[in-house]
Image (tube, helix red, strand yellow):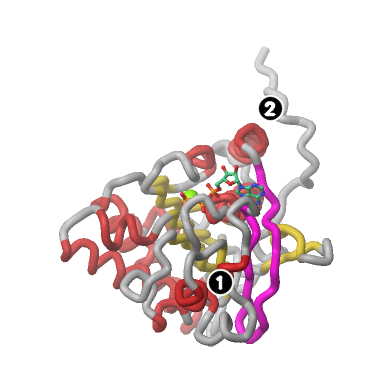
Amino acid sequence: MTTTAPAPTAGIPVGPGLSMFDPIFVGIDEFGQPVYITLAYRNLLAGGEPGGGKSGLLNCIAAHAALSVDSRLVLLDGKLVELGQWEDSADAFIGPDITAALDVLRRLQQVMNNRYAWLRAHGRRKVTALDNLSVITVLVDEIAFYSATIGSKQEQEEFVALLRDLVARGRAAGIPVVAATQRPSFDIIPTSLRDLFGYRAAFRCTTPNSSNIVLGHGWAEQGYSATDIAPTNQGAAYLIAEGGIPRRIKVAYLNDSQIAGIADYAAWIRRPGTLTTPTDTTGEWEMAA
Ligand SMILES: Nc1ncnc2c1ncn2[C@@H]1O[C@H](COP(=O)(O)OP(=O)(O)OP(=O)(O)O)[C@@H](O)[C@H]1O
Ligand SMILES: [Mg+2]
């Protein structure tokens, strides 16, 4: 007799499934109030010095995305260990391999183009929660690793061009990008790319200039500089949302064993044949391969 295995981490307090269209809890502000972001139509850039807490934020977002039944995950992680625990919940997990990174970005570009063709045919401008299309959340841990460290100059340039196109056009097609960099400098994050990210989080920076590169020009001079975050205050950041003013936050941190538990549960709710959401049936992602 076959029995259905119980959920591996039955104690995890989540509902039958979250949605990527739901607000995502990312931490608290300086008054202790919860801070939420809505990623379905916005991209997020996290910048700051090594050890500042960028990967902590990416993991917090990955947890929500993995538990969202209308989300697919595409992960690019040069270090393998920052997002590695979500591999079983992801459609693609790319390590230090520029060829694989370019392949997956080209595929995403194709999906994005198909979605725009579909939207146009329906006289629409953006996907919504009712469209039977999954949100494809793309997480890139360390832009500079792919755009300036590995691969040939030509491959790096193609990576930047594809990433820029996704960041510029992906939102309305339900393909948000969340990217981190420990090198907030003009060569890695030119202003034209930075401004495409609707959310920007500056973790501790060493100079007001690098804080400005993440948050936007002039914020350091107005008193919002990530240089004033203590090195011991990991996970603290200034978060700015399009059109707003920077807000000091402390990211909700998941330690390795908490991530293991949530990732295990997320992989379980995503096991083949169990997702009842349209993500199983559209086949668009497979078709783009
Ligand atoms: N929100 C947080 N609350 C408490 N501690 C945190 C938080 N975020 C990070 N830390 C601590 O700081 C360490 C470094 O964080 P994290 O790996 O996220 O930094 P990073 O900015 O991604 O660094 P790198 O640029 O080297 O990848 C973590 O291992 C953890 O101990
Ligand atoms: Mg990191």
- Identify the residue at the far top of this view: 1
Q: Which residue is mark 2?
A: 8
Q: Residues within 10 Å of mark 2 (few under 14, many from 20)?
A: some
* Residue 275 seen in this snapshot: yes
In this view, 282 is above or below 169? above
- The residue where tag 1 is placed is 200
Q: Position of residue 113 (x, y in %)?
A: 38, 73
Q: Is mark 1 within 8 Å of ligand 1?
A: no
Residue at 72% across, 49% down? 17
Give the residue drawn at x 69%, y 19%. 3
Give the secondary structure at mark 1. Answer: strand
Indicate the secondary structure of the residue bearing disc 2.
loop
Cα separation, mark 2 vs mark 1, equals 35 Å
Within 10 Å of the Cα at label 1, are there few (<14), some (14-19), or many (20+) other Cα atoms? many
Q: Position of residue 86 (x, y in %)?
A: 53, 42
Give the label, 2 or 1, closer to the camera.
1
Whether the residues at callouts 2 and 1 have beta carbons within 8 Å, the answer is no
User: 61 left or right of 120?
Assistant: right
User: Residue at point 41% right, 56% down?
Assistant: 142
- Image-quadrant location for residue 203: bottom right
Q: Amino acid at mark 2?
A: Pro
User: Is 237 included in the stretch rendered in magenta?
Assistant: yes
Where are the magenta residues, as a range?
A: 234-254
